[in-house]
Image (spheres, rainbow, N blue to C red):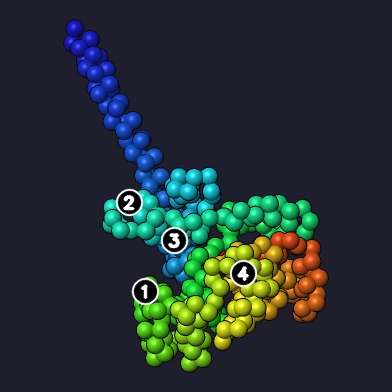
Amino acid sequence: MVAASKTALKKVAVKKSAPKVGAAVKTAKGLRTVTSETATSAVHAANGSARTAAQSDALLAAPAKKAVRRKLGATPVSVVPADAIATAKSPARAGKNAPAAVTPEFARPDYWDKACADLVKRDRIMKKLIPQFGPVHLMTRGDPFVTLARSIVGQQISVPAAQTVWVRIQAVCPKLTPAQFIKAGHDKLAACGLSKRKSEYILDLAQHFVSGALHVATWTTMDDEAVIAELTQIRGIGRWTAEMFLIFNLVRPDVLPLDDVGLIRAISVNYFSGEPVTRSEAREVAANWEPWRTVATWYMWRSLDPLPVAY
């Protein structure tokens, strides 16, 4: 009887301890998972310390992809502002007057997929490049004045330097309207890091918008050269700046900015093993990209700098 009782007690003890053992195993697995996620986050944080805000936007894009599609229906979006993602996840954080979580300007250009498929078939370099960047695509801010103003800021300086100046300008002119730039005046714009000449250029641009001298409403229906002709009448806007406008604001599919140093360098690296390239040689390479030279140019830029730029 005593022996039987002891055996029974042991069985009960084993049964009672079994769930604890199982829980311990689950906890151990959980710890391994948490540890792995923590390590990954640490790596991202370390890498992120050297990245710009725009790079963070790109990193945040993948987790938000499904939420973005729900907002825009069937239109896929690859990169959206970080504050838009935060708003989508928690609308209460932004308040009742918050902007929409994702704006249409970040929608994938309707010709993008067709252009990529065509370029992959006809160009050996594009065949290697395009798959490397997944769903990331050309982005636009959508506002004509802002696009042109950012292009002026970015003339002849690096992308990070231009971004630093633009952030300061946003602090002075948060609405980014032509009238606000005019009100800020030359001195405040110069204090943001703009040269005297660039400050004058942006103020002249603002005056053109306020006066109604530009045919802004008809730009979308004008051909590329007609838009370039009108824009280059403004001080500080040359062909390169006008072509950036065609690419980043009007999202024209077949723009070839031969005055762009980055494009020429990328063609040199990818097609000529780093040897110097003339404009005519670059034009000859780009002839194979028609009618998708904007898309091919964008991938040429990405081959040098994976960070997408938006004007």
The kind of residue on which mark 1 rests is Pro
Tell which circle, 4 or 1, labels the residue nearer the N-terminal end: 1
Q: Is there a contact, CB below 8 Å, between mark 3 and mark 1?
A: no
The residue tagged 4 is 246
The residue tagged 2 is 90
Q: Residue at x 53, y 44 (%)?
A: 74
The number of numbered discs placed on residues in the rendered structure image is: 4
Horizontal and vertical percent position of residue 172:
36, 80
Q: CA distance from mark 4 to mark 1?
A: 25 Å
Is residue 45 something one can see in this rendering? yes
The residue tagged 3 is 81
The residue tagged 1 is 174
Q: Residue at x 66, y 73 (%)?
A: 226
Horizontal and vertical percent position of residue 146:
48, 73
Q: CA distance from mark 2 to mark 3?
A: 15 Å
Badge 1 density bin: few <14, some 14–19, many ≥20, Cα 10 Å: few
Q: Nearer the viewer, residue 149 or 267?
A: 149
Q: Tell me where residue 16 sits by quadrant.
A: top left
**In the picture, which quadrant includes the N terminus?**
top left
Q: Residue at x 49, y 68 (%)?
A: 143
Q: Tell me where residue 159 sits by quadrant.
A: bottom right
Badge 2 density bin: few <14, some 14–19, many ≥20, Cα 10 Å: few
Horizontal and vertical percent position of residue 61:
48, 55
The kind of residue on which mark 4 rests is Leu
**Position of 287 relative to 213 (above/below):** above
Tell which circle, 4 or 2, labels the residue nearer the N-terminal end: 2
Q: Nearer the viewer, mark 1 or mark 2?
A: 1
Tell which circle, 1 or 2, labels the residue nearer the N-terminal end: 2
Label 2, secondary structure: give it.
loop
Tell which circle, 3 or 1, labels the residue nearer the N-terminal end: 3
